Amino acid sequence: MLKQTLLAIALLTGALCVPAWATNTAKIHFEQTVYDFGKTSQVETVTGTFKFKNVGDGVLKIEAPKPSCGCTVASLKPDTLPPGETGELVFALNLGRSRATMEKIITVKSNDPQTPEVLLTIKVDYTPLYDINPIALAPSVPFGGKATNLFVTITRTDGKPLGIQRLEPSKPWVTAQVKVEPGAKADASTARILIEVQPDGPPRRFNEYVHVYAAGQSNGPVSVIYVYGQVIGDLSLSPEALYWSLTAAAQTPAEPQEALMVRRLAIRSNNGQAFELKNPKSTVPGIHLELVPKEPGKVYELVAKLSETPGQTLSGNVSFETSVTNQPRIEVPVIVNVFKP
């Protein structure tokens, strides 16, 4: 009797220790959590399906999947499953036009108490049909000057003739042409493209591109050559923008507060010629500006001080006049980013 009593107590204790989620509980199970496409080319998008099943004994409810980047789209069919039912998560990954080794994540959350979050991985080693090297150029162009001898190599990776139909720059002052090497065959799968840049307008940074079109490829450009650069004037700025990051209700000691409210910007002569600055102005209210000579005629410091923390994020610019002919007025972007607790 004693043994039977002890056994009954042990069984009852074990039953009481069973977790609440052991009954009437959903449980998600994916057939695979990694989808590896391996080496892929000649496509712009890859698609696939992650299959899953509710192996629990409660109704499974799944939230909308969250991809790690905007290049991935994912959808569920369905988002609610009774016990024993199966579903699918269908995805599409846009590969773009550049060679890349990709690893993207899709986060799936559900009411499974044991595994409330599952990470699904998509892997691709992508080579585009038309491969550009380098994919971007970054010329620095003197004001009124021209950047020449900027080359990229374009290759059709399936070995067929390039068949380049046309090159379309984003601005008239960016030109592009295919340069055929001496002795090259007409059906060659590789060539060089010459880019020349002669910007108009004042000294500044620019962000342009050249679209590459090929015969038989009707879905837009087959590749893009990016041209990021800068027109260099007689004066240079460091940094090139003024930025504050503040908390609206921050209560800080006097010295740290002073440091938080002040930003400094150096203006230098690139050619050693003397210059003068005057008349600083701001489109953002509450900014006090002062131009301080650091090296007479060669280096100035622009001191920008906020009188108080704004109630919201503000943006605009500060400007000042110069004695330099090709840069009579300079504008500097301003952002005052205010976080509200």
Image: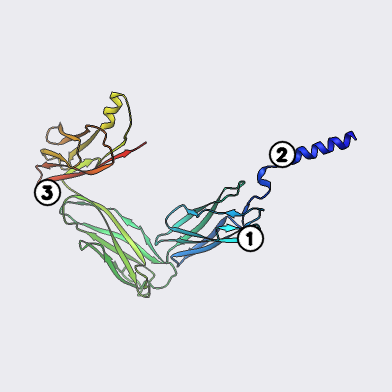
- The kind of residue tagged 3 is Asn
Please indicate whether residue 335 sits to the left or right of residue 293 in the image: right
Seen in the image, is 105 located left or right of residue 330? right
The residue at which mark 1 appears reads as 85
Question: Looking at the image, which residue sits at the far top?
Answer: 254
- Which amino acid type corresponds to the residue marked 2 in the rendered image? Cys
Q: Could you say where residue 222 lies in the image, as x and y percent from the top left? A: 37, 67
Which residue is denoted by mark 3 in the rendering?
326
Residue under the point 11% across and 42% down = 321
| Label 2, residues with CA under 10 Å away: few <14, some 14-19, many ≥20 | few
Instruction: Report if the CB atoms under discs 2 and 3 are less than 8 Å apart.
Output: no
Left or right, residue 69 beside residue 229: right
Task: Work out which quarter of the rendered image holds the N terminus and state it.
Answer: top right
Residue 262 coordinates in the image, percent (x, y)? 24, 32
Mark seen at residue 17: 2
Tell me the element at label 2. Answer: loop
